[in-house]
């Protein structure tokens, strides 16, 4: 584009003050702060100015300098700035515990019971009987003890924090023995050796990647040893020629040398998953029964509450953890504890859990139910998007978030192809739609897994596909 044309377009750009004086901007100012409206208009003008200066192909024209165009650009920015970035999404990926989408869906009964309470003050750290200040972990300790059989319990803000504070409190400045096959790295570059180093403990690796014997642990014990640590492989599997020392034997070895046995289960199973057709996942209660001194787990995986790290175990060990200097830095807030306590109540009744808890309701969904839901969704999509090719097909989903990584969940999918709209672009449009639908892509088709979709979400997802393919 010739420089004279660019200069002419730049001269035609309206000023920020003139745009602020329009009726459109006046309407925005009635609903939004003046500085924010001004910022969005200024950004719109500056962006167009930059585009004109960088234009070498004559793509910019008089339309880009019009007040209507600039106000439209400013309005898009205003919407982006005033719409919450964390919002409701439809998970059609088939991954039940989807980390990027907030992991577990909180039970509706839990959310409903919290909604009114959160509008006022709550009894977070007070004893109603005496009126005196009390520790916030008391709000959930009673039910964690009931469900796991532990003497005591506390909660920190996630399981990585639980690992950090347990090691710091029980083995800071000492050596901690761990199998080489358990030196895990999980999402977000969380590495057990790094966390152990931050705790002040020195890691002592024993065994090999695939085989570690009890004698390997025994040979590594010295006067500098502070604990034995086991990390259950909830987010990976070593298969084939493998060997791991049983927990009960590790407990016996640790206690014979006066050492604490720390068991990091990760996923946090409180009930057997066999009832859902899945393999056995070690329960927190089983680790306690085997004699582990401290057991750790995430609160937002198989427990399905808010983000947190659950710590249960012997009273003396838990007290050392509670009173450690890191405890205040890693403590949880009221919403985490409220959601956790109310979610834990559901585990008292496995049948109620399967009905009320979204995670377990998804796990328990029967093939016939999933097939019928997929057909219903396909019919709605065909009506909303007549140009799209729609097919119901069988497939697999996953529990997700590092839980049961090798287990596939048979499911039914709705595959959508939109002709001239490529699958990647269609998936992007669905994410950006007001319904905010997340899908997956295979063979240049967008797939919607109905296992992770509620019945009430089907019309919204179908309407989104209609808008995305129009």
Image: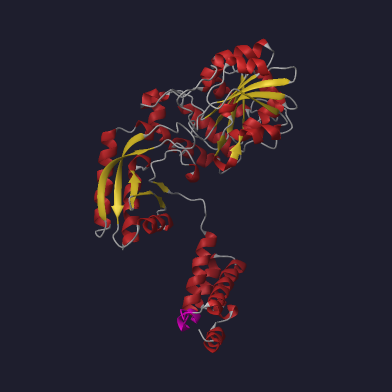
Q: Is residue 165 magenta?
A: no
Q: Which residues are magenta?
A: 57-66
Give 36 or 27, whichever is nearer the viewer.
36
* Colour logic: secondary structure
| Residue 176, quarter of picture | top right
The percent coordinates of residue 399 (x first, y second) are 42, 35
Give 211 or 78, whichever is nearer the viewer.
211
Compared with residue 468, is residue 275 higher up or lower down, i.e. above or below?
above
* Relative horizontal placement of residue 178, taking residue 302 as reference (left or right): right
Compared with residue 447, is residue 365 higher up or lower down, i.e. above or below?
above
Give 204 or 229, whichever is nearer the viewer.
204
Q: What residue is drawn where x is 53% and y is 65%?
A: 31
* Relative horizontal placement of residue 270, taking residue 203 as reference (left or right): left
Q: What residue is drawn where x is 52% and y is 41%?
A: 116
Compared with residue 350, is residue 429 higher up or lower down, i.e. above or below?
below
The percent coordinates of residue 34 (x first, y second) are 60, 69
The percent coordinates of residue 5 (x first, y second) are 52, 87
* Relative horizontal placement of residue 151, taking residue 25 as reference (left or right): right
Give 181 or 29, whichever is nearer the viewer.
181
């Amino acid at each position: 584009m010739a420089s004279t044309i660019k200069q002419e377009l730049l001269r035609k750009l309206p000023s920020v003050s003139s745009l602020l004086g329009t009726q459109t901007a006046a309407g925005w100012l009635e609903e939004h702060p003046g500085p924010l409206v001004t910022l969005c208009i200024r950004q719109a003008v500056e962006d167009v100015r930059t585009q004109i200066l960088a234009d070498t192909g004559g793509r910019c024209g008089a339309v880009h300098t019009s007040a209507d165009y600039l106000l439209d650009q400013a309005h898009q920015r205003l919407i982006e700035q005033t719409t919450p970035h964390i919002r409701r999404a439809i998970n059609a990926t088939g991954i039940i515990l989807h980390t990027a989408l907030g992991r577990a869906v909180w039970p509706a009964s839990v959310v409903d019971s919290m909604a009114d309470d959160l509008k006022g003050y709550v009894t977070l750290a007070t004893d109603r009987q005496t009126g005196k200040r009390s520790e916030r972990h008391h709000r959930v300790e009673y039910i964690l003890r009931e469900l796991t059989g532990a003497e005591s319990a506390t909660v920190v803000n996630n399981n990585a924090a639980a690992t950090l504070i347990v090691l710091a409190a029980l083995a800071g400045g000492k050596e901690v023995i761990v199998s080489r096959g358990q030196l895990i790295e999980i999402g977000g570059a969380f590495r057990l050796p790094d966390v152990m180093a931050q705790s002040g403990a020195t890691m002592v690796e024993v065994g090999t990647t695939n085989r570690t014997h009890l004698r390997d642990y025994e040979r590594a014990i010295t006067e500098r040893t502070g604990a034995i640590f086991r990390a259950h492989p909830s987010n990976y599997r070593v298969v084939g020629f493998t060997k791991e020392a049983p927990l009960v034997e590790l407990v016996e070895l640790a206690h014979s040398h006066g050492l604490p046995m720390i068991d990091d289960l990760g996923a946090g199973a409180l009930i057997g998953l066999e009832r859902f057709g899945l393999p056995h996942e070690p329960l927190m209660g089983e680790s306690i029964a085997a004699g582990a001194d401290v057991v750790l787990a995430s609160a937002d995986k198989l427990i399905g509450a808010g983000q947190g790290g659950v710590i249960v175990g012997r009273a003396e060990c838990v007290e050392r953890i509670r009173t450690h200097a890191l405890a205040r830095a890693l403590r949880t807030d009221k919403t985490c504890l409220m959601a956790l306590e109310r979610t834990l109540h559901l585990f008292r009744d496995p049948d109620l859990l399967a009905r009320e808890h979204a995670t377990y309701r998804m796990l328990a969904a029967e093939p016939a139910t999933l097939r019928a839901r997929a057909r219903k969704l396909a019919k709605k999509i065909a009506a909303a998007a007549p140009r799209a090719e729609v097919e119901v097909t069988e497939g697999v989903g996953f529990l997700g978030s590092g839980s049961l990584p090798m287990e596939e969940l048979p499911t039914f999918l709705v595959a959508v192809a939109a002709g001239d709209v490529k699958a990647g672009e269609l998936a992007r449009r669905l994410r950006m739609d007001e319904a905010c639908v997340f899908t997956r892509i295979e063979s240049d088709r967008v797939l919607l897994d109905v296992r992770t979709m509620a019945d009430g979400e089907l019309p919204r997802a179908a309407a989104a596909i209609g808008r995305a393919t129009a």
